[in-house]
């Protein structure tokens, strides 16, 4: 699909009104860029062939045309994969983000993995983390510091399966991962084959688990706003003394998340921090 990218130059105080008019006119995306003269440049995208307003159509004096161009659809992930190289995550992991068909030789030979690191093959195929984001790296860091041998683990919002694979490499006896995005377990199953690891994966929510299933540890790399309402149901699956590794938390929300988890009977055991993000390892008291 092709898109028309149209540019508008305007005073900053007209931004909200202009953006509202552009959305009403059918734009599929708008970006505001500050200019050296103090004005803004609005970049609005429209499907090619669809009606796209001219500045005069917005009904706002002071909005001027600043050009337009036709843009063909681009697979940005493909571009990323063309340039992607294996990279280190946390203290002990080495991630290869390339697609198998793009390997002109085995992606990473055993001797090429740096000493003390374990290889994970996680092609970047969709909006699921491959370990490069701080929230995933922090969860991995907390897993590295935990004794996972023989544990039964539940991976909530499994995405690519990166945390599930790390748990199995750490010695977990069983890992069940699920995601409410139906595409996620499909990608995770593909990654299972690439890594020779076999978590049990499904699309859905915690309610789909069998009643008798219980766990020693729950992995949650999901923003709190999305998952906190479900945490009572999820943590009810934990055995006595079980724990939660909770990531995806902005540092400014850390105290609120900790208070909510304390109300569910958890205490902080460890934490990891990077940039604006924190992750918590919590134990059931």
Image: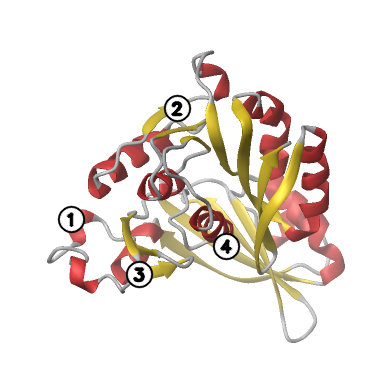
Counting residues from the start of the chain, the first of labels 4 and 2 encountered is 4
- Point 49% across, 57% down: residue: 144
Q: Is residue 100 left or right of residue 128?
A: left
| Mark-to-mark CA distance, 1 and 4 | 28 Å
Residue drawn 56% across the image and 56% down it: 142
- Residue of label 3: 116
Question: Can residue 74 be seen in this snapshot?
Answer: no
Q: In the rendered image, which quarter is residue 237 located in?
A: top right
Alpha carbon distance from label 4 to label 2: 25 Å
Mark 4 neighbour density, 10 Å: few (under 14) some (14–19) many (20 or more): many
As measured in the structure, the alpha-carbon distance from the residue carrying label 2 to the one carrying label 1 is: 26 Å
Q: Position of residue 26 (x, y in %)?
A: 62, 44
Residue 236 shown left or right of residue 82 in the figure:
right
In percent of the image, x 38 and y 58: which residue is there? 77
Residue 64 locus on image (x, y percent): 72, 70
First along the sequence among labels 2 and 3: 3
Give coordinates of residue 74: x percent, y percent.
Answer: 38, 58
């Amino acid at each position: 699909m092709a898109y028309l990218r149209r540019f508008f130059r305007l005073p900053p105080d007209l931004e909200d009104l202009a953006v509202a008019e552009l959305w009403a006119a059918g734009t599929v995306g708008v970006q505001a860029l500050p200019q050296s003269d103090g004005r803004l440049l609005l970049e609005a995208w429209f499907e090619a062939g669809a009606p796209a307003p001219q500045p005069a159509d917005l009904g706002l004096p002071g909005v001027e045309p600043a050009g337009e161009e036709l843009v063909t659809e681009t697979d940005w992930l493909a571009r990323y994969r063309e340039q992607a190289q294996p990279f280190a995550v946390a203290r002990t992991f080495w991630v290869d983000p390339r697609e198998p068909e793009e390997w002109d030789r085995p992606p990473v030979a055993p001797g090429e993995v740096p000493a003390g690191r374990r290889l994970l093959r996680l092609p970047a195929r969709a909006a699921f983390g491959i370990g490069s984001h701080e929230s995933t790296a922090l969860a991995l860091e907390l897993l590295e510091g935990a004794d996972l041998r023989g544990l039964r683990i539940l991976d909530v919002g499994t995405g690519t399966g990166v945390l599930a694979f790390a748990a199995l490499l750490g010695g977990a006896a069983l890992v069940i991962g699920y995601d409410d995005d139906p595409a996620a377990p499909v990608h995770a199953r593909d990654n299972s084959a690439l890594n020779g690891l076999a978590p049990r994966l499904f699309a859905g929510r915690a309610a789909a688990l069998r009643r008798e299933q219980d766990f020693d540890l729950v992995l949650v790399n999901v923003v709190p706003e999305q998952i906190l309402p479900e945490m009572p149901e999820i943590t009810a699956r934990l055995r006595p003394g079980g724990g939660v590794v909770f990531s995806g938390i902005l540092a400014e929300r850390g105290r609120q998340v900790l208070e909510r988890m304390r109300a569910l009977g958890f205490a902080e055991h460890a934490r990891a921090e990077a940039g604006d993000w924190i992750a918590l390892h919590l134990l059931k008291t």
